[in-house]
Amino acid sequence: MEQVVTIKEMKEIEQKTYAVQHISSFDLMVKVGKEIYKTFQKEDSKSKTFLLLCGTGNNGGDALVFGEEAFKQNKKVHAVIIGQPSKQTEESLLMIKRYQDQNMELSFVEHYRDFITLVDQINHIDIIIDGLFGIGLSKKVAGLYKDVIDWMNQQKIKTLSIDCPSGLNADTGEIMGTAVKADLTYTIEAYKQGLLINDGLDCTKDIKVIHVGMESIPNQKFLYDTFQPMPTRIHNSHKYHYKNVLTIGGQVGVMGALTLAGQSALVSGVGLSTIATNIQHQDHFVRSIPELMYEVIQDQKDLLKLINKKDAILFGLGIKASTPFEQMIFDTLIQTDIPLVLDAAGILFLKQKKHSKNQRIIITPHYGEFAKLMDVDVNTISQNPTYYINQCINIYHCEVVLKGPSTIYANQNQMLYLNQGTPALAKAGSGDVLAGIILTFASRNLPIEHAILLHMFAGQEAKSKKHVESILAQDIINSIHLVYKKYG
Ligand SMILES: NC(=O)C1=CN([C@@H]2O[C@H](COP(=O)(O)OP(=O)(O)OC[C@H]3O[C@@H](n4cnc5c(N)ncnc54)[C@H](O)[C@@H]3O)[C@@H](O)[C@H]2O)[C@@H](O)CC1
Ligand SMILES: [K+]
């Protein structure tokens, strides 16, 4: 699994590497640039003409090393330094000297009109190497740099961004004014968190981690993208072997959520799935799935009877406004030892901070719900989701599935970023499907990260058949079996 780091953690890795390996900053930069070129060559040995766009920092230095390697192999290299030469780092100045010593083509540009004149003279470019900014981006991109990035995005030329697309904040994944839309991103030693959250996924296509043997730090944050096959079903088994789950919630007008979750639980492999609602709403059940069981609850006595022998319970879907009925459900469920998945309205009951005996609570908020739980605004969560996830785990002793461009799943031990989703999943009902799948995996004690990937890959399968705009939650459910088939 590839590690995910913040800028601060990446700098720690660099410092540790200098100290332990007695390597200079320049030598490390050379190692990085060479490795990036080597990896690129394996992927694309055909490109012959390179335009290097370098900033004044070491990200530009990496690009210059890349260019020197290409030059050694008789490729055509046009290197351009964008910005004031006085700002050049020591390391990139050393590279500039090497270019001059070898009579390599190198231009300095401080005005956009000069940049355009320069690139207009180049009659063909196979690939642009983006070395404007890496983890040193410190403010909004404006002026010359903005113009150059916008120019890059207008070209129909393949772009390789070094470390991260320039203009993308490598921590928050925000576009800082403007950012390169990279075809390839070669990120150094570990995934930068910003590649995975907010705008990160929209600025990247293929991402590769370039390992150069830097030292590691134990931060327990990883990218997780490999779906594992389900355990083989045995002949000598019955439906209870594959567990018995319950989904509780529902109010008039939003009852479909229960059906979607209950059906998703079945299709993802649970033995029995029941959905239950307040007796007052029983006429509004969406009874479209004959394999589901439909139950009503009048009071706590009914509830206790119903939860007997259940292996996991999902609570919170289809509730517009909570009433004493939902409060009774929540109060009862947190006093059981049955794994509990809280979604939608169910999540906010945690805020009451009641003593809970339940040892396994999994919450599945999107950013808006999570912001409400943590009493901050959505933007604050987006800026630093991992901080708030850790806070949440400490306060509520729960596992967190934070749904976003990458979904982040965290428990006491580790934090996993799952980036296989598709914008097709941004549709009503999709979260209910995910909650139902998680319910199955919780009941069968299977890894929750696989439940999330199953949902994401099902979305991808659905997208391969239907236009992204037209995918319904039902299509995701109907694609679950394809993911199982594919992965054995
Ligand atoms: N020894 C090292 O420091 C290593 C650095 N590496 C590379 O170097 C990068 C980090 O290098 P740096 O710390 O030099 O930083 P960067 O090269 O990412 O950028 C910093 C430079 O850009 C300027 N700048 C930042 N934001 C700006 C903005 N919005 N508008 C205009 N100018 C802006 C800064 O003043 C500084 O000159 C990494 O991402 C990686 O690519 C790797 O080579 C590994 C080793
Ligand atoms: K870059």
Image (spheres, grey):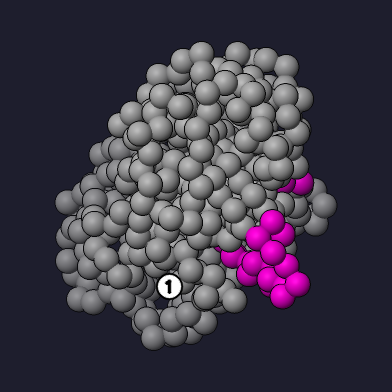
Q: Which one is in front, 226 or 472?
A: 472
User: Farthest right residue?
Assistant: 20
Residue located 59% across and 70% down the image: 35
| Whole-percent x, y for residue 51 in the image | 34, 68
Residue located 69% across and 64% down the image: 238
Q: Any magenta on residue 193?
A: no
Examine the rendering and report whether any part of residue 195 can be seen.
no
Q: In the image, is residue 209 above or below residue 37?
A: above
Give the left or right position of residue 120, taking residue 390 as reference.
Answer: left
Q: Amino acid at mark 1?
A: Asn
Residue located 30% across and 38% down the image: 177
Residue located 38% across and 47% down the image: 287
**Residue marked by disc 1:** 103
Residues shaded magenta? 218-241
Alpha-carbon neighbours of circle 1 within 10 Å: few (<14), some, or many (≥20)?
Answer: few
Say which quadrant the N terminus sits in. bottom right
| Whole-percent x, y for residue 430 in the image | 39, 47
Give the left or right position of residue 226, taking residue 68 as reference.
Answer: right
Q: Which one is in front, 54 or 423?
A: 423
